[in-house]
């Protein structure tokens, strides 16, 4: 499972980060800056919760 | 395909009524329309009620300009920074401001906020009663504002007075332009003098204001009048929004026993109340955001024309079933908070959202730790007002118990 960020839509609500800080680190301005899009095994539910916490719908998950 | 335009003529942007009235009215309108044209005697605008439409429009600044942010001021004399700028001009300012409002930076204000909350609540508890709006809700964000900007705390009474003039309606619920402009001029005058003083003394001083004195746009120092303008907007954006979100939250908790006990239990156990804060922010979202249509565009089956004005009542978007099942009721025990739009969407997403969340969480946790039980004074029915920001005039609380 892979995290996909539409950075054009991210406006820095930081709700993804509030839900799963390690998977969705922020840059200095508070916008999401995913460094490793690969979701570690066992972390799928946290990733899904974080994706659905985004008010802008800027996040999604892809297979593989 | 566009559907014939139906017009609503009995809706009013500004008004006074029961605390739940505005939210209920939007629920009723949303059941009939996703977007509807409103004509008032002196105003005309589109009202966007549907969650997905609100988000999509706010994410599209090319079509929906922030040049006009309320039909109450259709020809603004100047553009407030950054809220009335469109990209790319907006983006420059936002980049300068953002690091000072990031979740990490805002977290540093938490200890000071907790300290002030404990002081305020202890004094209220000793008195055994209060007007929550005046004695707590308005004061806390103003203290934070002074702290954040790097201004002396002795200015608190002065700033509270200016805030009352600039942002609050009169007791009849009217926004008196002369009184508002008076308050705004006072704030502008203060920041002009403070910036001049810091420039002359050669010492930038503390806080965000100190940083602002060094800001550049395209390699040129930002002019002082633009900095004053931005300071004014920070003043206007971060005070009554927090105060009124807190007041609606406390009104709800004072009148819903199970919810109050739930919050008191979390506070006593030292558990996070962040989920509670999200749900209260969602259900009682206070702002009605506005835009001006820049190019003809079809939205929700309606044809909007360049020049049309649009209002987005965020409380309507947040209570739409499209956001989450059961959105029309408040549920403090839901596991995952809904991705609501109380802080807007798109490039103008509330810059202060991380600060506001901390303020709400510290304020509600601190109150319930010290005063877990309380009630509305029985002989009063709190009245709300609405306009660009919804509010409550006063909230008398008593019967403090443990
Ligand atoms: C619960 C409290 C608050 C709520 C509900 C709220 C809501 C909002 C909303 C909906 C917007 C978007 C307006 C638009 O799109 O036209 C906004 C913008 C803004 N808010 Fe807040 N706000 C709150 C607290 C604060 C605080 C504490 C500050 C800090 C000073 C703040 C500063 C700002 C600024 C500077 C903007 C303009 C951002 C821009 O144009 O890029 N707000 N707020
Ligand atoms: S929640 Fe959405 S908008 Fe907010 S930082 Fe994460 S990706 Fe960006």
Image: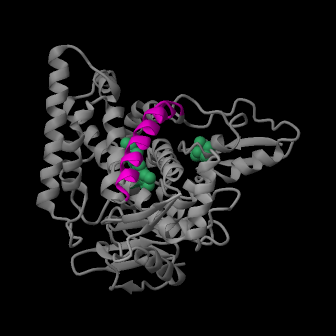
Q: Is residue B281 magenta?
A: no
Q: Is residue A6 left or right of residue B302?
A: right
In x, y percent, where is residue A37? 76, 35
Q: Is residue B38 above or below residue B247?
A: below
In x, y percent, where is residue B118? 44, 42
Q: Is residue B343 left or right of residue B177?
A: right
- The residue closer to the viewer here, B308 or B291, is B291
Number of numbered labels in the structure image = 0
Q: How is the image coloured?
A: one colour
- The residue closer to the viewer here, B159 or B320, is B159
Q: Is residue B102 visible?
A: yes
Q: Is residue B352 left or right of residue B271?
A: left
Q: Which is the main secondary structure of the residues drawn in magenta?
A: helix
Q: Is residue B296 visible?
A: no
Magenta range: B104-128
Looking at the rendering, in which quadrant would you find the N terminus of chain B?
bottom right
Q: Which residue in the rendered view is the most extreme toward the top?
A: B202
Q: Residue at x 20, y 21 (%)?
A: B198
Q: Is residue B146 above or below residue B308?
A: above
Q: Is residue B109 magenta?
A: yes
Q: Residue at x 64, y 56 (%)?
A: B337
Q: Residue at x 37, y 67 (%)?
A: B310
Q: Residue at x 14, y 17 (%)?
A: B200
């Amino acid at each position: 499972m892979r995290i996909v960020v539409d950075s054009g839509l991210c406006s820095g609500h930081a709700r993804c980060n509030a839900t799963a800080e390690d998977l969705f680190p922020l840059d200095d301005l508070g916008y999401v800056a995913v460094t490793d899009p690969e979701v570690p095994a066992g972390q799928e539910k946290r990733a899904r919760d974080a994706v659905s916490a985004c008010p802008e719908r800027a996040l999604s998950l892809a297979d593989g | 395909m566009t559907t014939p335009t139906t017009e609503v003529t009995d809706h009013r942007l500004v008004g006074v009524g029961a605390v739940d009235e505005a939210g209920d009215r939007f629920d009723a309108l949303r059941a009939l329309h996703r977007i509807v044209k409103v004509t008032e005697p002196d105003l005309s605008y589109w009202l966007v009620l549907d969650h997905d439409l609100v988000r999509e429009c706010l994410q599209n600044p090319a079509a929906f300009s922030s040049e006009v942010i309320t039909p109450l001021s259709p020809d603004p004399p100047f553009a407030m920074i950054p809220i009335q700028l469109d990209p790319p001009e907006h983006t420059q300012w936002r980049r300068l401001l953002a690091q000072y409002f990031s979740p990490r930076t805002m977290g540093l204000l938490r200890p000071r906020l907790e300290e002030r909350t404990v002081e305020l609540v202890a004094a209220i508890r000793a008195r055994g009663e209060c007007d929550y709006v005046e004695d707590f809700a308005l004061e806390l964000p103003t203290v934070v504002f002074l702290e954040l900007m790097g201004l002396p705390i002795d200015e608190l009474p002065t700033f509270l007075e200016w805030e009352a003039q600039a942002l609050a309606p009169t007791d009849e619920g009217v926004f008196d332009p002369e009184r508002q402009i008076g308050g705004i001029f006072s704030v502008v005058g203060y920041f002009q003098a403070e910036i001049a003083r810091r420039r002359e003394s050669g010492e930038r001083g503390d806080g965000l204001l100190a940083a602002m004195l060094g800001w550049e746009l395209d390699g040129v120092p930002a002019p002082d009048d633009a900095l004053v303008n931005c300071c004014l907007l920070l003043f206007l954006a971060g005070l009554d929004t927090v105060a009124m979100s807190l007041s609606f939250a406390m009104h709800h908790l004072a009148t819903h026993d199970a919810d109050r006990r739930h919050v008191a239990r979390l506070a006593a156990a030292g558990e996070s109340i962040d989920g509670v804060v999200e749900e209260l922010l969602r259900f009682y979202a206070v702002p009605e955001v506005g835009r001006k249509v820049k190019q003809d565009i079809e939205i929700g089956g309606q044809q909007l024309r360049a020049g049309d004005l649009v209002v987005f009542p965020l409380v309507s978007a947040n209570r739409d079933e499209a956001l989450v099942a059961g959105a029309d009721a408040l549920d403090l025990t839901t596991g995952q908070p809904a991705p609501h739009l109380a802080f807007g969407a798109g490039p103008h997403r509330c810059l202060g959202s991380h600060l506001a969340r901390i303020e709400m969480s510290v304020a509600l946790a601190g109150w319930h730790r010290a005063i877990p039980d309380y009630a509305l004074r029985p002989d009063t029915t709190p009245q709300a007002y609405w306009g660009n920001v919804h509010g409550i005039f006063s909230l008398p609380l008593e019967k403090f118990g443990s």
